[in-house]
Image (cartoon, helix red, strand yellow):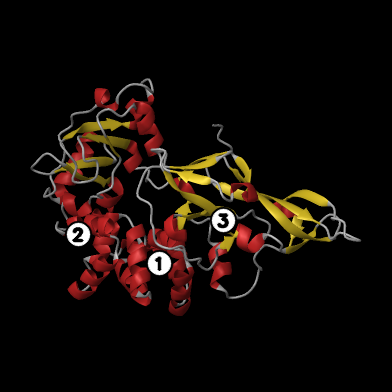
Amino acid sequence: MTTVTRAYVSRLAGLTVFDPNGDRVGKVRDVVVGLRVGTACPRVLGVVVEVVARRRIFVPMGRVTALDPGAVMLASGTLNLKRFEQRAGETLVLGELLDRQVRINESGKDAHVVDAGMEQTRTGDWLLSRLAVQEPGRLGRRGQLHQLAWDEVTGLALPQTGQGAETLIATYRELNAADMAHALQELPIKRRHEVAEAMDDERLADVLGELPEAEQITILGTLDEGRAADVLEEMDPDDAADLLSELHDVDRDRLLELMEPDEAESVRQLLKYSEDTAGGMMTSEPVILAPDATIAEALARVRQEEITPALASQVYVCRPPSATPTGRYLGLAHIQRLLREPPSTLVSGVLDDLEPLRPEAPLAEVTHYFATYNLVAAPVVDAQGRLVGAVSVDDVLDHLLPEDWRERARRG
C-alpha cells in the first residue's frame, strides 16, 4: 500500500482502521479539527472511529502512522475506548463543516463547502488546508466547483473578539504546554477554570503537568470526577502519581477507581515509592522492546509524537512481558548508536550494559548517576531484575529546584 500525505476527508469516511498487527479496529466516521482565529489552517486533532456496538471513540492523530488509499494504520499502544465526546474548540469536518456557507475572497460570491482536504506537514502534523466549495446553481443545474486554499474563503474561522473559551483556546493552540500553563496563570481565577474546563483531556493533562501543585489540585477539583479521572489517564503516570499523592486518601482512591484499570495500576505502583527516590521520580512507560526487535522498529517507536525527547533518547530491551514490571531487563540502547547501525540489526546486539538504578535510590544518588554517565534518562530495575520504569532528567531537575520555582518563573 502507498502511504499518502494528502487526503480529502470525504474519502476517509468508512475506511477500515487497523492496528499494527493487522487486526481490524473499526471504521473512520469523522475527522476532528481545531479552528483557529484569522486565516490559519485548522490543525487536525484526530479521527472518530466506530468500533464494536456502534461505539464511537477518539483516536489522536499522533497515533495514526499511515493513511493508505484503502485503510488507516495505527501505532502500537492501548486505545482509549471511552465514548467520544466533542469538546469546546473542536469541530467535526463531516458533521459540521460540510454544507457550511462561505464567501470566496477573490470573486465575493457565496458558496457552500462540499469537501475538505488535509495534508501532513514536514513536522508530521496534519492541517486542514484545502476546501472544495460550490456556488449555487441555476435552473436545477449544479453551480461551479472550486478547489481553494483555506485562506481563500471567509466564514469558517473563529471570531477575533468575544470572551468564549473556544476562541481563547484557539489563540493559545500553538503554545507548548509550559507556555500555556504560564498564560493560564495570568488569567483571573474564574476565567482560568473556564478555559481549563473547555480544553480537551490530552491538552489539559499536558498543561496540568506544568502547573504548581496547588494550582493542579484546584483545577482538578473544579472538574467532575469522571472528567478528572479521564485527565489523569492522559497525564504521564509519574505526574499523575505526584498530583494524586497531594490529595486526601478518600479522593485519591475514588479517582483511581474511576480510571481505566491498566492506567490506575501504573499510578498505584508509583505511589508506593517516596517522591525523592528513583521510584518516585520515574515514569512507568518508557520505550520497551523485545530482544528480537530490529533497529528499524526501535526508531519507529521513538518517532511517536507522544514520547518526550528525554525518553526517546534510548530504548530498553527486556524479556516478555513488555509492560512494567517487565520480564528480565537485558540492557539499553542509545538512539545515537541506533542511528549508526543497519536498520535490520537486532537491538539486543547493540546494548549498553550500564548498571541500572534501584527504585529506592535517593535523589543524591540519582543526580550523581546522571552526572557520571552523561544521561538524559536512566533505567530503574527492581530486586528481581525487572524494569519498573525510567527516570528522565526533567524529573530530576524538578526535584532539585525549589518547590515554588514555577511560581517564581511566572513572576519573573
Left or right of 59 on screen, residue 248: left
- Mark 2 packing: few (<14 Cα in 10 Å), some, or many (20+)? some
What residue is shown with label 2? 268
Front position in the image: 63 or 388 = 63
Residue farthest along the right direction in this orientation:
139
Q: Residues within 10 Å of mark 1 (few under 14, many from 20)?
A: few
Please report the residue visible at 62 percent of the width from the left and 75 percent of the height from the top: 162
Residue under label 1: 411
Q: Earlier in the sequence, mark 1 or mark 2?
A: 2
Q: Which of the 4 quarters of the picture holds residue 286?
A: top left
| Label at residue 30 | 3
Which residue does the image show at 79% across and 50% down from the upper left?
146
Residue 186 at least partly seen: no
In the picture, the disc for residue 138 is none
Across and down, in percent, residue 34 comes to: 57, 59
What secondary structure is found at the residue carrying circle 2?
helix
Q: Which callout, 3 or 1, points to the residue nearer the camera?
A: 3
Mark 3: which amino acid? Asp
Query: What residue type is disc 1 on?
Result: Arg
